[in-house]
Image (cartoon, grey):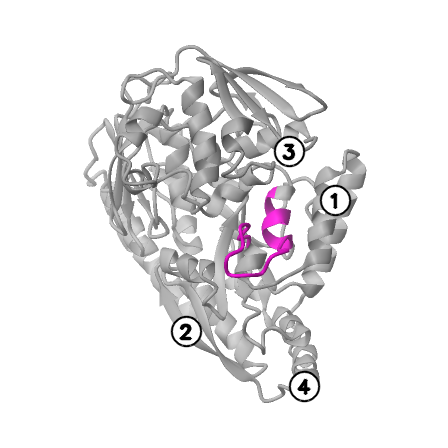
Amino acid sequence: MLNRRSLLLASAAAATLPAALKGAAAQTPRDVLVFAKQIDDIITLDPHEAFEYTASEIAANVYQKLVTTPNSNPAQITGELAEKWEVSDNNTTFTFTLRQGPKFASGQPVTAEDVAFSLSRAVLLNKAPAFIINQFGFTKENVAERIRATDARTVVLKTAEATSPSFLLYCLSAAVGSVVEKAAVMARAQGDDLGNGWLKQNSAGSGSYAVRQWKASESAILEANPHAVQAPQVKRIILRHVADPSAQLLGLTKGDYDIARNLGADQIKQLQGNPAYTVQSARKASLLYLSLNQKNPNLARPEVRQAIKLAIDYAGIQKAIVPTTYAVQQAFLPAGLPGALTDTPFQHNIAEAKALMAKAGLADGFEVSFDYSSPAPFSDIAQAVQANLAEIGIRLRMLPGEQRAVITKTRARTHDIAMVRWGSDYFDPHSNAEAFSINTDNSDTARARTLAWRASWEIPELSARTVAALKETDPARRSEMYLQLQKDHQQSSPFVMMLQEIEIAVSRAGVKGFDMGPMNDRHFYTHITKA
C-alpha cells in the first residue's frame, strides 16, 4: 500500500511538471506570498496560549521578545527588544534595558510596561506554555512583585532562586516570551480573560507582520506592520491549509502557491534539479513520537511499553515513507541540541516483543484506540505502526483527525495511544527534558502539565534527576547527566520516540529569503522577496 501511494504521488508530480517548465503557470501577485501548508494544528493565535507548530511560527513573525537566537548560530543569545541586560543578587535579579524604536502595529512604542504585562500575563493565564516561565518561581500571587517595569525602558525579573543566566534567557526566547501591547489587549478583555478571547484570532505585536484573519483549517493571513523596525519585503503573507501534499504540488506548479511546505519524498525528488524550483531544508528540533497513556492498565505494564518499542520498524518506516523529511531518533533530545543521545537501541524484533507480551500476561494481545493526524505522511506512518503492533497482538482502533483534535485529546489525557509531534521551545536540553521527564503531581488539577503528565506518568525520581541536571553548572557533567537521563528514559518511559523532522520547503523560482530555523518560532518571513 505504501509503495502504491508513493507511486501515485510520484506520478502526480511528474504529470504537473511539464506545464511549469513551459512557463504556462500563473503567478501570485508580487506583493503577496502564498504558503501551501498543513495548518490544521492551530488552536489559538494568542502567543501566551499557543503551543503548536504553525501558531508558534506565526507568533515569530507577529511578535518580538526580549531576546532571541539567530538561525546562523542557534546557541547564541542576542537582544531583540532588549538592548542589554545585567544579572545581580547572586543570579536572582535580571535587569533588561529596552531598545528605543520598536513599535506595535498600532504605532505605539513598546514600553517596559508592555513587557512586564506580557510575561506576567503568561503566568496569570497559566495556559499550556506557561510552565516555561513559571519554573522560575513566578506565580499568580507573586508575579506583580517579581516582574516589574521600573521605568519606560527598564524591566526587572526576580527569580525564586539562583538561576543560570543563559537558561533564563533561552526560556525568554521561546514563543511564550512574546510581547503584546497591553493597552490594545486589555481594551478587548472580557471579564478576567486578559484579552485571551480576542487574541485567539487577532494580534497586538511589534513584529514584521500583524494578523489580519485566521479561519480554522482554511487559511491565515498576515499584513505587513507599517511600523516594524525591519520592514518586510512582501506586504501580505497567506498560509493556506492544503492537507494533501499532491494538491500542494499541483498548486505550486500552477503558480497558485509560492512555497510548498509538506511535499512527500517522491514529490521533492521530482523537483530537485529543476531550475524552476528551489529546495531548502532545515533539520528541526522536532520529534514524532507515540504517547502511551498510563491510565490504560495494559499500557501501564512495563513489558507492554517495551514490547511496543521493539515492535516498531523505525528504519523501515523512515526509508519507505519519509526518507528525505525525517531521520530515526529514539531519544527525547533531538540531534543537534546539547547533550542529545543518538543511540538507537530499539530495532524491529517481533520475537522479543512477543516474549514481553507473554511475560505481561497478554500473549493474546488487546485492543486499544490510536489517535493520529490524518494528512500524509502521518496517516501512512500510522498505518505502518498499526501493522507492526498487529504482529504482537495489539489491535489498534484507528482514529484519524485534525492535528488540533489529537493535541486537545492528549492534553485532556483521554487518549490511549496517540502519535504526536513535539518541537523544542528553546536551545537548551531542559526544554525537552522538562516536558518528557518531569511530573511530580499527576492529579487532574496539576499546575505543571508536561508531556509526562499528559501520559499520566508520575516520576518523582526521574523528575528530581532532571532538575539536578538543570542546576548543574559544569557543562561536561551536565551533558553527561542528560545522556544518562535519555538512556533511562528510553527503557522506562511511556514514550516511543520515533523520528526527527527534516523540514523541506520548495519555492518557485524568484522566491528567496525564507529563513528556516531549527525551531518552529525561528521561521522568518521578513526577508522573503519575489522577483
- How packed mark 4 is, by other alpha carbons closer than 10 Å (few <14, some 14-19, many 20 or more), is some
Q: Earlier in the sequence, mark 1 or mark 3?
A: 3
Q: Earlier in the sequence, mark 4 or mark 2?
A: 4
Spatial CA distance of label 4 from label 3 is 49 Å
Q: Earlier in the sequence, mark 1 or mark 4?
A: 4
Spatial CA distance of label 4 from label 2 is 24 Å
Segment colored magenta: 431-450
Residue 444 locus on image (x, y percent): 51, 61
Residue 529 locus on image (x, y percent): 33, 25
Pick the quarter of the image with the N terminus: bottom left
Q: Secondary structure at mark 2?
A: strand
* Residue pictured at 80% horizontal, 40% vertical: 477
Spatial CA distance of label 1 from label 4 is 37 Å
- How packed mark 3 is, by other alpha carbons closer than 10 Å (few <14, some 14-19, many 20 or more), is few
Question: Could you tell me what secondary structure mostly forms the magenta stretch?
Answer: loop
Q: Earlier in the sequence, mark 2 or mark 3?
A: 3
Which residue is identified by label 2?
Answer: 398
Residue type pointed to by label 3: Ala
Which residue is identified by label 1?
Answer: 468
Q: Is residue 294 above or below residue 52?
A: below
Residue 475 locus on image (x, y percent): 77, 35
Residue type pointed to by label 4: Ala
Spatial CA distance of label 2 from label 3 is 46 Å
Spatial CA distance of label 1 from label 3 is 16 Å
Residue 363 locus on image (x, y percent): 63, 87
Which residue is identified by label 4?
Answer: 358
* Residue pictured at 70% horizontal, 45% vertical: 467
Q: Mark 1 or mark 3, which is nearer to you?
A: 3
Residue type pointed to by label 2: Met
Q: Secondary structure at mark 3?
A: loop
Which residue is identified by label 3?
Answer: 160
